[in-house]
Image: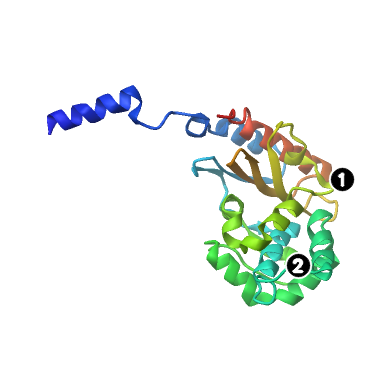
Amino acid sequence: MKRIAALVLVAALVGGAAPVGAEEEWHPRLGAARSYADSRAGSVTFAVIGPRGRLYQHDGRTSVPSASVVKAMLLVTYLRMGSVRDRRLTDDDRDLLRPMIRWSDNDAATRVADTVGERRIERLANDAGMKAFSWTRPWGLSQINAVEQARFFFKLERYIPARHEAYARYLLSHIVPSQRWGIASLNHPNWTFFFKGGWGSGTGWVNHQVGFFERDGRRIAIAVTTRDSPSHDYASQTLRGVGRRLLGEMPDPQ
């Protein structure tokens, strides 16, 4: 037994163990992000999931009104419907989903919500392990939290029929420039950001961003929520500040 243990140890030291790469070493700058969040007016929560699936969070289980963040769940719920999941998307489907995600059209979201119904979206929430999620109408008052949204985006494709993955990813990575503030304005070359934001009609009531960065098959999911900020611009600065401190140096390519 001692000889076997010694051989295992030698193998690990010589190279038998998996190499320690960026995925294993990377972690968010949690302390700096927490200090910054606590210094900001209003309420700030966040959650981050690193490439290897480790969760980091700050008040991340605090429930907040979803605003337009819930549109990502509406998108997935629509694509999962029995009448949609196994066929090609029509022009009517795309004309409904595109404005809801890319420029956050509220009328389109209401039509999608009416189409999918409460039971289907609650089924998605249950499948995604969202124990704190609460659906209501108007849909913008549905309750979410940062931890559950980060987990949802970290495993997003798990909940989407395979034939519709590419379209969902396209929409979430092509948000119009006028809505790419906060985390979306950070400069991380060669990483693609898939996300959805939600805000309170230009006020500081709520302003959230949830999504994931992806590069070479690696993913970092992030969700930041704010409530009761002095203004929309102030809240957007908070989102950017938290994101910049959390993400710091992104993992290098392997």
- In percent of width and height, residue 237 lies at 77, 37
Give the side of residue 22 with respect to residue 90, left or right: left
Q: In this view, does 30 lie above or below 105?
A: above
Q: Which amino acid does label 2 sit on?
A: Leu
Residue 197 visible to the viewer: no
Dividing the picture into quadrants, the one containing residue 33 is top right
Secondary structure type for disc 1: helix
- Viewer-closest of 34 and 181: 181
At x 14% / y 28%, what residue is drawn? 3
The quarter of the displayed image where residue 192 is located: top right
Q: What residue type is labelled 1?
A: Ser
- The N terminus - image quarter: top left
Quarter of the figure with the C terminus: top right
Q: Where is residue 8 in the image (x, y as percent from the top left)?
A: 24, 30
Label 2: which residue? 89
Disc 2 to disc 1, how far (Cα)?
Answer: 27 Å
Across and down, in percent, residue 223 comes to: 64, 47
